[in-house]
Amino acid sequence: MSIVFVPKKLRGKAKINQETIQRLLDENDQLIRCIAEYMQKGRAVECVQYQQILHRNIVYLAIIADASPDSMPPSTHSTSNETSASTPTVNGNGGTS
């Protein structure tokens, strides 16, 4: 279950830290892989639930990013660069369109 599912009575009380953000990013990575696998098998209908969870996670991360001060730790920026550098291998075409 996604860590974004938080009971209403606990919402706003969770501490947002690097570990929580990394768990969400790891979960998103797994969701994207699962969606891609289902799409390759022609099972787009099964993808919908995973796409909804991925969307909710991305929106949640965007809200955190918008609410956080501009002084982010350097590790956050290097993780972003590493992720974009590895993206071409996910689609299997080596980065060429």
Image (cartoon, rainbow, N blue to C red):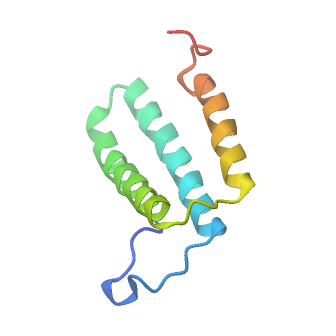
Q: Is residue 18 above or below residue 93?
A: below
Q: Residue furthest front?
A: 70
Where's residue 40, x and y in %?
42, 24
What residue is shown at x 56% (from left), y 53% (from top)?
25
Q: In the picture, residue 5 is in which quadrant? A: bottom left
Q: Nearer the viewer, residue 67 or 90?
A: 67
The quadrant in which the N terminus is found is bottom left
Q: Nearer the viewer, residue 3 or 71?
A: 71
The tally of labels here is 0
Where's residue 66, x and y in %?
44, 60
Q: In the picture, residue 57 is in which quadrant? A: bottom left
What residue is shown at x 53% (from left), y 23% (from top)?
91
Q: Residue furthest left?
A: 45
**Drawn side of residue 33 relative to residue 12, left or right:** right
Where's residue 60, x and y in %?
41, 61
What residue is shown at x 47% (from left), y 64% (from top)?
64
What residue is shown at x 38% (from left), y 29% (from top)?
39
Q: Residue furthest top?
A: 97
Q: Nearer the viewer, residue 52 or 39?
A: 52
Q: Is residue 32 above or below residue 75?
A: above
Q: Is residue 52 above or below residue 11?
A: above
Where's residue 23, x and y in %?
59, 61
Q: Nearer the viewer, residue 38 or 92?
A: 92
